């Protein structure tokens, strides 16, 4: 390849592994009561999390040692496979409905979310597409519309499940790549206004989304319905104080707070580890985002730089949405906290993506 390769950025590896370790511990703490009630085994979610964490770390170290230029050859076929899976998952009898969304493929407790694969597939494809056609990106019709059209099609398929949280992360990471590649801010501003109008249309079209918006503005209007999750999350965070109630001492995990091991695991962290524990988690994410952007800035070529922007943007947007929901800043959406929430395909693919980022950091200028 002719590129000088050095050691991967340790400041990416350490925060990732620390967040993963915190995640394994907190998944057990948050889920033990729920797991015992549903499966008769308080270690059920811990075992799954540990297995997928190990698989994810193996995948991370594998992709860390695979030259990032390899993904250039597979970007188009990867996106095609991701689109195929998004279509297949919508077929009744094949796609599995969980949490009100037909977003899973699999049997029984084991399954994959095609939308998770689409996030990294879209990052690789757009990075390849825009690095090869960067001179056109300032042109609206020939440069900007094609990547936006592909992104919009993927978002539309994800919304048919429906899964607004994952769709928002996909759009956020994609727009960061498009903007970084040189798209004109004026064009993106016009499209942003169209996007806001479309979002309002989506909210109006689905009554349950409108309920989530009104519950977000004042959850106490419907404390046992649409506002229940937000209220219970705040009830978890409030008593945590500075140092928390202590590891394993959460009260809200006793069937008060829904999804304590996934979407609302940060609530349990704040309740058990307090302000200090929550701040530590945010600090680790901040370090990871900082070093990821540094890898993007010092990347050896445009393709690598755009991949790094996309991966770190995916992580940052997902963290912002998840914690924003938990503390009542955003309406409730089903989205996990990277590296920490209980997960299978989402956890493994997130760690795989970090491995690609680490490989890019090995070629920093």
Image: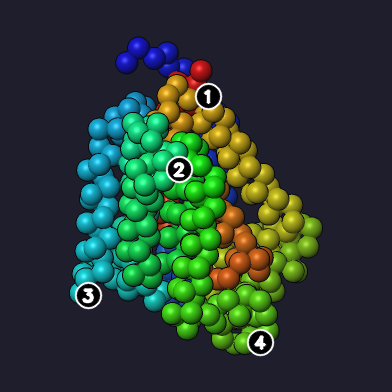
Q: Nearer the viewer, mark 2 or mark 4?
A: 2
SS assignment at label 2:
helix
Question: Does residue 320 appear anywhere in the picture?
Answer: yes
Do residues under tags 1 and 3 come within 8 Å of each other at their CB atoms? no
225 on left or right of 51? right
Q: How crowded is mark 2: few (under 14 residues within 10 Å), some or many (20 or more)?
A: many
Q: Which of marks 1 and 3 is in front?
A: 1
* First in residue order: circle 1 vs circle 4: 4
* First in residue order: circle 2 vs circle 3: 3
The residue to which callout 1 is attached is 298
Q: In front here: 359 or 186?
A: 186
Measured in 3D between alpha carbons, the distance from the residue under mark 3 to the one under mark 4, in whole angstroms, is 36 Å
SS assignment at label 1:
loop
Measured in 3D between alpha carbons, the distance from the residue under mark 2 to the one under mark 3, in whole angstroms, is 34 Å
Measured in 3D between alpha carbons, the distance from the residue under mark 2 to the one under mark 4, in whole angstroms, is 40 Å
* First in residue order: circle 3 vs circle 4: 3
Q: How crowded is mark 4: few (under 14 residues within 10 Å), some or many (20 or more)?
A: some
Q: In front here: 116 or 300?
A: 300
* First in residue order: circle 2 vs circle 4: 2
Q: Which residue lies furthest to the right in this view?
A: 242
Q: Does 352 sit above or below residue 326? A: above
| Rendered residue at 52%/65% (across/down) | 196
Do residues under tags 3 and 4 come within 8 Å of each other at their CB atoms? no
* First in residue order: circle 2 vs circle 1: 2
Return the x and y of residue 190 as percentages of the image width and height. Answer: 51, 55
The residue to which callout 2 is attached is 178
The residue to which callout 4 is attached is 221
Do residues under tags 2 and 3 come within 8 Å of each other at their CB atoms? no
């Amino acid at each position: 390849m002719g590129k000088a390769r050095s050691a991967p950025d340790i400041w990416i590896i350490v925060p990732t592994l620390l967040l993963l370790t915190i995640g394994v511990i907190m998944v057990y703490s948050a889920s033990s009561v729920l797991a015992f009630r549903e499966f008769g085994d308080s270690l059920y979610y811990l075992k799954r999390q540990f297995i997928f964490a190990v698989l994810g770390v193996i995948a991370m170290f594998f992709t860390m040692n695979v030259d990032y230029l390899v993904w250039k050859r597979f970007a188009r076929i990867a996106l095609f496979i991701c689109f195929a899976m998004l279509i297949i998952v919508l077929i009744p009898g094949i796609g599995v409905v969980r949490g009100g969304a037909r977003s899973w493929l699999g049997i029984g407790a084991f399954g994959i979310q095609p939308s998770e694969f689409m996030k990294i597939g879209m990052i690789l494809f757009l990075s390849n597409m825009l690095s090869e056609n960067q001179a056109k990106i300032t042109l609206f019709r020939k440069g900007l519309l094609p990547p936006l059209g592909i992104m919009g099609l993927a978002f539309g398929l994800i919304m048919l499940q429906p899964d607004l949280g994952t769709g928002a992360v996909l759009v956020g990471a994609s727009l960061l790549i498009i903007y970084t590649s040189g798209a004109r801010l004026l064009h993106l501003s016009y499209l942003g206004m169209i996007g806001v109008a479309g979002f309002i249309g989506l909210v109006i079209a689905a009554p349950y989304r409108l309920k989530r918006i009104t519950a977000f503005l004042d959850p106490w209007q419907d404390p046992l319905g649409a506002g229940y999750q937000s209220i219970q999350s705040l009830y978890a965070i409030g008593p945590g104080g500075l140092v928390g109630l202590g590891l394993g001492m959460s009260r809200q995990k006793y069937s008060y707070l829904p999804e304590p091991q996934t979407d609302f695991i940060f609530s349990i962290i704040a309740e058990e580890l307090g302000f200090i524990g929550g701040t530590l988690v945010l600090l680790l994410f901040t370090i990871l985002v900082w070093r990821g952007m540094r890898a993007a800035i010092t990347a050896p070529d445009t393709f690598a730089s755009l991949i790094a922007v996309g991966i770190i943007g995916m992580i940052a947007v997902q963290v912002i949405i998840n914690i924003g929901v938990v503390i009542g800043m955003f309406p409730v959406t089903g989205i996990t906290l990277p590296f920490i929430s209980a997960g299978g395909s989402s956890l493994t693919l997130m760690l795989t993506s970090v491995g690609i980022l680490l490989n890019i950091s090995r070629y920093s200028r």
